[in-house]
């Protein structure tokens, strides 16, 4: 993973994706396909985007018994995605099975997709953790413990808040990838995100990759928004 800016394609159907991508005139991008688009359009949307030269983070957050996750990962590896993810809450056996499935399904000569874990969703609060999930630990401790499980299971990194990156890197090393959504410019709408950071802050704190959705997809000028975000992320002057 070479510190990409990943655009979240949070669209309901292919036509909207095509309209959005037309703005970029064939530029190769790093795109996140999530549940909304994948469940509507199926694996062909991934093949189509790959064939157009884009890199793909397939954000399906797998969480099931180890055998089912292993089998699913075999098929996902054959799709040729670059990043896939699981919920660390599925446990170490499930995460190990995910890696076995990816290794088994990767066509020879190709790179295995990177696999990262969701520790706690950014929509989870401390109150929800203790009252609904009955987890009697601080959110930071839970994130760190789940991240550590992911590393021990052979995963390549985690999805986390930018603000958690220094803690994760201190405990688990800089080689363990931290992919961070919740990215906004200071002038942007915060929407439903709580723990947000600017692209510059994400760079300073050491994120491996940033995921940006609405600040680009809903911008009046998506190309200009993308270029500004990317320049800030890469530390270039604009
Ligand atoms: O529009 P916005 O930039 O908030 O989009 C962020 C993207 O990152 C969405 O696709 C969302 O599902 C995803 N995501 C997130 N928080 C996580 C995991 C994924 O916001 N913990």
Image (cartoon, helix red, strand yellow):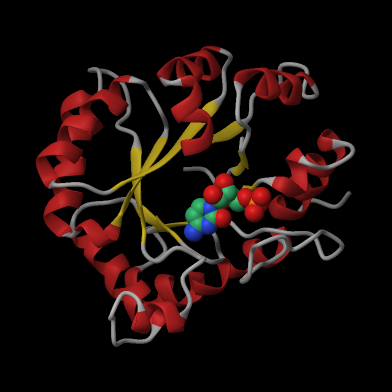
At x 47%, y 29%, the residue is 38
**x then y, percent, for residue 5:** 63, 44
Picture quadrant of residue 52: top right
Side of 212 where 20 appears, left or right? right
| Left or right of 164 on screen, residue 215 | right
For residue 43, above or below residue 73: above
x and y, in percent, of residue 119 in the image: 36, 64
Can residue 63 be seen in this snapshot?
Answer: yes
**Residue lying at 66% horizontally and 62% vertically, measured from the top left:** 192
**Residue 113 shown left or right of residue 50 in the figure:** left
Q: Quadrant of residue 44?
A: top left
- Tell me if residue 50 comes above or below residue 36 in the rendering: above
| Residue 209 visible (yes or no) | no
Total of numbered circles in the picture?
A: 0
**Quadrant in the picture for residue 68:** top left
With respect to residue 98, does 234 lie above or below? below
Of 86 and 204, nearer the camera is 86
At x 61%, y 38%, the residue is 10
Nearer the observer, 186 or 175: 186
Q: Position of residue 16 (x, y in %)?
A: 69, 24
Look at 72% across and 23% down and name the residue there: 21
Q: Position of residue 42 (x, y in %)?
A: 43, 21
């Amino acid at each position: 993973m070479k510190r990409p800016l990943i655009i979240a394609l949070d669209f309901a159907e292919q036509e909207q994706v095509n309209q959005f991508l037309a703005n970029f005139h064939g530029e190769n991008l790093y795109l996140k396909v999530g549940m909304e688009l994948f469940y509507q359009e199926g694996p062909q949307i991934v093949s189509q985007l790959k064939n157009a030269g884009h890199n793909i983070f397939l954000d399906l957050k797998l969480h099931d018994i180890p055998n089912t996750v292993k089998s699913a990962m075999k098929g996902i590896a054959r799709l040729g995605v670059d990043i896939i993810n699981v919920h660390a809450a599925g446990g170490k056996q499930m995460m190990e099975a995910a890696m076995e499935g990816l290794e088994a399904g990767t066509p020879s000569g190709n790179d295995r997709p990177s696999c990262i874990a969701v520790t706690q969703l950014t929509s989870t609060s401390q109150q929800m953790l203790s009252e609904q999930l009955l987890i009697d630990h601080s959110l930071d401790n839970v994130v760190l413990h789940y991240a550590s499980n992911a590393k021990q299971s052979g995963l390549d990194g985690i999805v986390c808040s930018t603000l958690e990156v220094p803690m994760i890197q201190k405990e688990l090393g800089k080689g363990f990838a931290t992919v961070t959504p919740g990215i906004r410019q200071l002038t942007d709408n915060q929407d439903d995100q709580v723990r947000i950071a600017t692209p510059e802050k994400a760079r300073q704190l050491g994120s491996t990759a940033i995921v940006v959705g609405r600040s680009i997809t809903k911008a009046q000028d998506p190309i200009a928004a993308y270029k500004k975000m990317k320049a800030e992320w890469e530390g270039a002057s604009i």
